[in-house]
Amino acid sequence: MRYLVGVVRIFVGILFIISGFIKLNDPVGFSFKLEEYFSQGVLDLPFLTPFALAISILVVIVEVMVGVMLILGYKRKITIWTLIAMIVFFTFLTFYSAYFNKVTDCGCFGDAIKLTPWESFTKDVVLLALILIIYVGRKYITPLVNSKVLTTVLSASFFACIGYVYYVLNHLPVIDFRPYEIGKNIEEGMSTPDDAPKAIFEYRWKFDVNGNEEIHISNGDYPTVDGEFIDVETEEIQAGYEPPVHDFTIEQAGEDFAASLLQEPKLVMVIAYDLRKTNLEEFKNIKTVADKAIKAGYKVVGMSASGPEQTDALVKEYNLGFDFYFTDETTLKTIVRSNPGVLVLEKGTIKQKVHYNDLEDLIFN
């Protein structure tokens, strides 16, 4: 039992550290996921939405620290009960989300590893079983080092978390797991390979045959039945390939200009997913950057999910030399974790991407 608990303890601790670090790398992205849980009927706590970022930071730091504490064998009672409380809560959350199809991606490993709701629930059930093993064999958990070293390692881990999250909030994630990372081509990300798996559907056809209801199951072909058609139900039994870049449009007056703009050899995108939440003062610097880019021969476009009244007012107030286009809010949040943020592209390939705090890093050749 001692050796089993030892192995499980290390495994669970490392898993919590990895999971926490991935979300610590992108706390803004995790806060967006929490907003979904708060507002889409899973937790039904919309009043917490304004605090999603603060909660996300707290949760991921606790997740990392609990993993470190478990491995080190520090305060085993507090550590184990914290683990149990967290895993029971998240097991309930993922089950509810999966069963009622509320949130399609739990965000457990950020954008690094995508899990379906049922995969997330299964993962939590396995983790719950492992943590129960740790609980049963808790007497075998002893500190790996003396108290002075324990305190030093824990303090260093905590302040490292604080420093790291401060950096990524004021710049951008150090590791970009999204399909809009520097070097990726957006058009290629929207394409589907010829050999990509196709979605498989099952159809349940209902017919009235001599006054009796009959159900015929097929994979799409209309069944040959000597009766009157009543209804058909469709169920996806195997998901098909989904391109990493989807729902990407650059619209103006109902027309999508994405295809033509992504062929521009010199293109700058100024992205502000919601002008009500953006840092308006930064548009003074955005204007300076945009004017410099235009002078260097770049085409500059704004992209926002806000309406034309708001974008037109912004352009007028800051005398911006470019127009805004409409793009889905979720897509814009995925592209850059900054509001506003700036991208530089060459025929659809992302060459530069910066937070509004790093506008001076942009280079226009």
Image (spheres, helix red, strand yellow):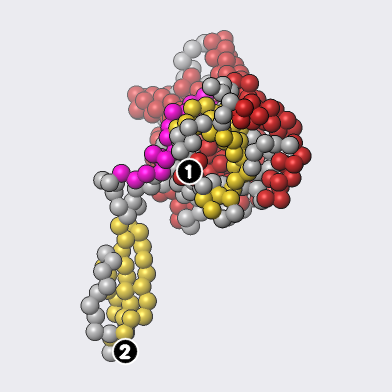
Against 226, is 173 above or below? above
**Residue 295 position in % (x across, y down):** 62, 27
- Front residue of 59/9: it is 59
Q: Is residue 48 visible?
A: no
Q: Which amino acid, mark 2?
A: Gly
Residue 276, quarter of the rendered image: top right
Residue 184, quarter of the rendered image: top left
User: For mark 2, what is the residue?
Assistant: 211
Res 122 label: none
Q: Which amino acid, mark 1?
A: Ser
**Residue 73 position in % (x across, y down):** 49, 21
- Horizontally, residue 190 falls left or right of residue 227, namely right
- Horizontally, residue 65 falls left or right of residue 232, namely right
Residue at x-position 63% and y-position 21%: 360
In the displayed image of the protein, which residue is found farthest to the bottom?
210
Q: Which of marks 2 and 1 is in front?
A: 1
Please tell me whether the stretch drawn in magenta is mainly helix, strand or loop. Answer: loop
Q: Start and end of the magenta stretch?
A: 173-193
**Residue 90 position in % (x across, y down):** 51, 43
Residue at x-position 32% and y-position 61%: 201
Magenta-span inclusion, residue 166: no
**Residue 301 position in % (x across, y down):** 59, 39
- Front residue of 70/355: it is 355
SS at mark 1?
helix
Query: Is the residue under label 1 in contact with that under label 2 (CB below 8 Å)?
Result: no
Q: Which of marks 2 and 1 is nearer the N terminus?
A: 2
Instruction: Say which quadrant the N terminus sits in.
Output: top left
Res 260 label: 1
Mark 1 burial class by Cα count in 10 Å: few <14, some 14-19, many 20+: few
